[in-house]
Amino acid sequence: MDLEQLKYPIGQFEMPELFNVQQAEIWISEIEALPNQIKKATENLSQENLNQTYRPNGWTIKQVIHHLPDSHMNAYIRFKLAVTEDIPVIKPYDEERWAETEEAKNGDIEMSIALLSGLHQRWVAFLKTLKLEDFQRKYIHPAHEKELTLANMLGTYAWHGKHHLAHITNTF
């Protein structure tokens, strides 16, 4: 398998031309399902498995698991900011450096799976309150230097979960 396939086992996210209620519901259900999928995909992995990388010079499976709640906590906050403020500028975080912190490299994955589960319950409860027009609200990501809609970000984070789930399931 080539490096690009290892990096992006499900391909890169592409926003569909049509965003409607059905598409929002699909992505929200994918976000809702992720914690249980991660739990199931990791339940029989050994410490040796968890310390294996999914690609050369990539993160370990353990780092991938810890990355998910780190990333999705930031996403949840960004969604709340976009709904409660007028086109806020969000604060980026250095995901590479976060993945190198001690607990992300060596911590028990159960704490991150539990965090992901609680976070996704809350995030999904919030997402289900939004109207279709709310997904057209925007925030500015300074690293991308552009306004991003919540519709696009909903799809991106649904994809993000499946992307990292594939890193785990394709490794074993």
Image (cartoon, rainbow, N blue to C red):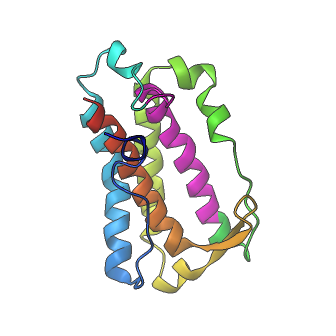
Quarter of the image with the N terminus in it: top left
Residue located 40% across and 44% down the image: 164
Tell me which corner region of the image, top left, top right, bottom left or bottom right, holds residue 85.
bottom right
Does the magenta portion include 64? yes
Q: Position of residue 47 (x, y in %)?
A: 36, 14
Span shown in magenta: 56-80
Q: Position of residue 137 (x, y in %)?
A: 61, 79
> Is residue 125 among the parts visible in the rendering?
yes
Residue closest to the far front: 2
Quarter of the image with the C terminus in it: top left
User: Could you tell whether 130 is left or right of 97 in the image?
Assistant: left
Does the magenta portion include 23? no
Towards the viewer: 37 or 10 = 10
Towards the viewer: 143 or 106 = 143
Q: Position of residue 116 (x, y in %)?
A: 44, 42
Q: Position of residue 77 (x, y in %)?
A: 62, 56
